[in-house]
Image: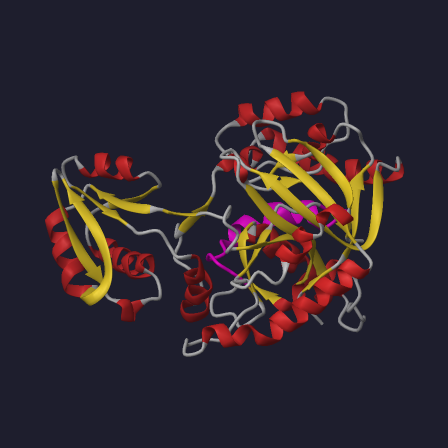
Amino acid sequence: MNAFLPADILLPKTKEMEKWAVIACDQFTSDQAYWDRVRATAGDAPSTINLILPEAELGTAQEAAHTAIINETMAKYMAEDVFETYENSYVYVERTLENGTIRKGLVGMVDLDAYEYSAGSESKIRATERTVVERIPPRQRVRRNAPIELPHILMLCDDHDCVLIEPVAAKKDSLKKLYDFDLMEDGGHITGWLVSGEAVEQFNAALTQYSAAVGEKYVGLPGVPMVFAVGDGNHSLATAKSCYEELKAANPDADLSAHPARFALVELENIHDPAQVFEPIHRVVVNTDARALLAALEAEACAEGGYPVTWYIGKESGTVTLDRAKSELAVGVLQSFLDAYLAEHEGEIDYIHDDDELIRLADQENAIGILLPGMEKSQLFRGVIADGVLPRKTFSMGHAREKRYYLEGRKIK
């Protein structure tokens, strides 16, 4: 069985889709005003803002109250026949981003038996970042009793030859259009088409062939090849996995092979889509002896022919070459060194997206900035396969408003 499958997908019957779709709960976590505007925009219309818990509300007085009513609202929407069900289908999605590019994806469900989020996993589907288990319980409190799920998870494939999503895109004019509207809060535009019947069979066949040959891409790497990587929403997928494992533990003799909790809805995207941009996240260390840190970096983590990175101390700058034998990624070499060094020496690390900001911060007393190169897209899979999970803050997949909006749903009970 493939690890990514068609699902019985729920979409609202509402004519006010711009009020229905809401951005991922883990965005704008320090901006309660954003979420207040979302609630005001949605008003009394059916909306996913009533079905999710924004992380901006974690630890606040609203958390318990909103957690309690989320499941009630889900049940209410189902009782009021808010949803249309599209059985055994995918949804092909085109998201127009702020810069005008169009990011393509396919919504379906993943088999949670094929997913592990622990470091060193050998599963078909793996996390790209280390999972913080403390972030799972608040999500579990929502999902345990929820009758439906809504995904903001973006799952990635390393499809150089574009044999999976792109053939679906090529025949979109022959598919039924399901929605086409502007997303609220400057989220761009989104359009979705129903992929059903013969189109499902064609995609499934392509995925079967792709999965069988995926190991040929990573010959010579330590570790077991994988089929998919979780790009965004790993903690939400980890929550689905945790709830499914709880269900299995509570029903040791039951056959749960077809239980809806075994699966989770995601959007699959190809890292080789031109609209898929991985932006580097740089490092600055402050309140440290910058020269001593640089000397230690050169002595302990550099080698001839390594990854070239640029350092800044005040007005000075230079280049060091990080030892390729230590990681598949330059950021892996650097982060491992910094973790060990700062455990023994003074200094605080910060993670900076903008080149100019990194240089500005390095131009202060007792600071050093290190400008990392952009990660080649194929390095993501190679890094996870070889190193287990990527170092924290390895890359950013687009800007906050370009994250996935809740739109499609699926019954999980």
User: Does residue 146 appear anywhere in the picture?
Assistant: no
Q: Which residues are magenta?
A: 126-149
Q: x, y percentage for residue 271?
A: 51, 55
Image height of 355 relative to 310, above or below: above
Nearest the eye: 135 or 389: 389
User: Does residue 267 appear anywhere in the picture?
Assistant: yes
Q: x, y percentage for residue 113?
A: 66, 68
Image height of 161 relative to 138, above or below: below
In the image, is residue 205 part of the stretch drawn in magenta?
no
Q: Residue at x 53, y 38 (%)?
A: 402
Q: x, y percentage for residue 130?
A: 46, 57
- Where is the N terminus found, in terms of image quarters? bottom right
In the displayed image of the protein, which residue is found farthest to the bottom? Answer: 220
Image height of 106 relative to 164, above or below: above
Q: Residue at x 35, y 46 (%)?
A: 281
Nearest the eye: 347 or 259: 259
